[in-house]
Amino acid sequence: EVQLVESGGGLVQPGGSLRLSCAASGFTFSNYWMTWVRQAPGKGLEWVAVVKHDGAEDYYVDSVRGRFTISRDNAKNSMYLQMNSLRVDDTAVYYCARVGGWDYFDCWGQGTLVTVSS
Amino acid sequence: EIVLTQSPGTLSLSPGEGATLSCRASQTVNSRNLAWYQQKAGQAPRLLLYGASYRATGIPDRFSGSGSGTDFTLTISRLEPEDFAVYYCQHYRSWQYTFGQGTKLEI
């Protein structure tokens, strides 16, 4: 069974940092691009970042570029999101997801809540 | 940047009825890169359709998708109680992924 489990969310002050993790199981992790998607409270879905299967390429939505870094460790079947210079509007549930062949997101974790507040 | 606009914002129907949800792109898109998701309250999204019309694994055949160019449709025939949720369309182009704002399907 394919499973994605996020961790690392919590409360952080504006300007602070947080590192999210996504642990994958049930599939060959190193074969897939992986992504982070977030959802602010009561709002819709927003794509955040994506990383290539070997970690050699990564791409970001404009609002987080330069502040967030996506990475992965295929030996540990894990993906990460390092979030720096956090802002109040980064408050959201962050989901990790697997990227399917036609650039859709075919498996999702349960999400981890990040709250940026003073 | 491609903007996806979903309509209506909210759709009120009864179980057994059919539902038609629209997703309009701000410019012509490749239907291969158009997907639909369902999200129930308190849950993660679930992939319904990819390539505009291909059902994901385990998705019932009452869900169907169509469209090309700028206009895409998700159709749900014979609504079941578990189908009442929020639906999002999503597109990919040039290392950018975009979601529509969602359509809430309510009883």
Image: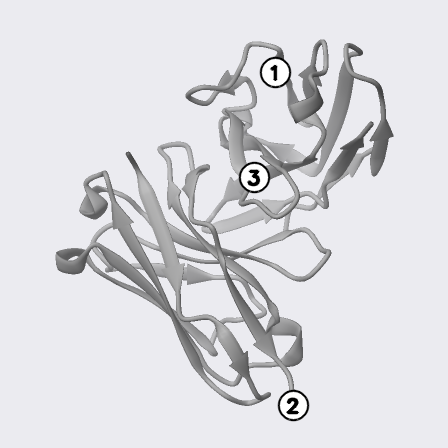
> The residue marked by circle 2 belongs to what chain?
A
Q: Position of residue A79 (x, y in %)?
A: 30, 60
Real-space Cα distance between discs 2 and 3? 35 Å
Badge 3 crowding class, 10 Å Cα cut-off, few under 14, some 14 to 19, many 20 or more, is: many
Which disc number belongs to residue A118?
2
Q: Position of residue B98 (x, y in %)?
A: 59, 47
Q: Earlier in the sequence, mark 3 or mark 1?
A: 1
> The residue marked by circle 3 belongs to what chain?
B
> Is the Cβ of the residue at disc 3 closer than 8 Å to that at disc 1?
no
Query: Could one spot residue B72 in this view of the protein?
Result: no
The residue that appears at 73% across and 56% down in the rendered structure is A42
Quarter of the image for residue A28 reads: top left
> Helix, strand or loop at disc 1?
strand
The residue that appears at 54% across and 14% down in the rendered structure is B60
What is the three-letter code of the residue carrying label 2?
Ser
Real-space Cα distance between discs 2 and 1? 44 Å
What is the three-letter code of the residue carrying label 3?
His
Which quadrant does the N terminus of chain A fall into?
Answer: top left
- The verdict on a common chain for dots 2 and 1 is no
Q: Is residue B72 above or below residue B25?
A: above
